[in-house]
Amino acid sequence: MQRKRWYAIQTYAGSELRLKHQLEERVRNLGWERQFEPLRTGEEEEFFFVPVEEVVTSRSGRGRASEYRIPYDYDLLVANNERVQRGDVIARRPPTHLARPAEVVAMEPLWRVVVETPTHAEIEYLVPQEKGLRRDVRVGERTRPGLPLTVDSDDRYTAGERGEIVARERVKRVTLRYGDGTEETRIIPEAYLHPQVRVGAALDEGAEIEREHKIQARASGLVKVKEYKDKREVSVQRIEKRRLIPGYVFTKMGLDEEEMFELLRGLERSARFVGSKTRPVPIEGPEILLVQRKAGLVETPQAAEAAKAPRVEVEFEVGEVIQIVEGPFADFTGEIREIDKEAEEAVVMVKIFGRETPVRISFDGIEKV
């Protein structure tokens, strides 16, 4: 058996994972497992590796963040920078029970409209359902002072400030009368009103009047939490896995040349080894360091802590050649193609196997040559 060395297999961009699975199956069918260096990426043992990076895509149209308004009477079940899956419960409000016996003496159906002002304060408007809301009074729409909320433009129900509508729901104003003659009103969403709550009903102590609320994630991703006076705002930012080196699959193996060509037989149009047409060439230097860092086999360099201090001004220019000093691309040099001052990142063109690949790197991770 030959000494195991790293090789790169070139394929069409977008076909890397399909090729990887084909090669994994072929190695096992041929019984060549011992001639490959097993790689552990997560819980699986693999013989072929496709370097990927996770990218938060909340700024893109495809990866727009899912946002949730979480009032403070809800229990927040997730933390900042925690990952969630679609369907996970991110907040919960427990069911509400009566502290003492009461009679339901009145129930009025209402619309509840919540407007968030530019200062993130919230204003609640309660409108009788019989009035009917205007068609443009819906979540996401902007309001202005004096904007009518009802179809008949009743002056009693107008927006008082400029802002954005963040909630619109059907609720019931429930009036409870206790044994000592005192009365209390509660606003309960119709979706969570317990069926036993109806006019004339006598409710015992501990009776449930509002069922449990749960807010579930509509998408998988990374949680971001912001705290405001009237609420918490939770967003779930989608995460995409992108090919770090498009068009390449990597492996560490000890096959001889005849076996290597046998490995790719039948795949010649979609896969070939990096090297000459007749002889695969092992890869070394910064290219293989990049692969080893992404596979967790070599420690990834980090910039010095002093370099992570906030920058006063941008020290780099488009067209400038720089060196990358942290992350999987450490030790590569490249030309700055684009500078994002707001995100404090630069797009650097890095040459890998003779092809230029755009890489987004923070200012902390690059240095002047």
Image: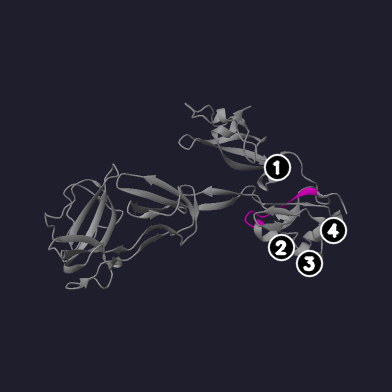
Residue 341 in the image: state x and y as whole percent.
47, 34
Q: The disc labelled 4 sits on which kind of residue?
A: Glu
327 horizontally vs 292: left or right: left
Q: Which of marks 2 and 1 is nearer the N terminus?
A: 2
Between the residue at mark 2 and the residue at mark 4, the CA separation in whole angstroms equals 16 Å
Label whose residue precedes the other's in the sequence (3 or 2): 2
Is residue 256 in view from this perspective? Answer: yes
Disc 4, SS: helix
Instruction: Give the residue pinned by disc 2.
Output: 22
Q: Range of the magenta residues?
A: 5-16
Q: Mark 1 points at which residue?
A: 298
Q: Viewer-nearest of labels 4 and 1? A: 1
- Indicate left or right for 228 with 328 as reference: left
Quadrant housing residue 360: top right
Which amino acid lies under the numbered mark 1 shown in the image of this protein?
A: Val
Residue drawn at x 40%, y 50% as measured from the top left: 234
**Magenta-colored stretch includes residue 206:** no
Image quadrant where one finds the N terminus? bottom right
Residues under labels 3 and 2: Cα distance?
A: 11 Å
Q: Which amino acid does label 3 sit on?
A: Asn
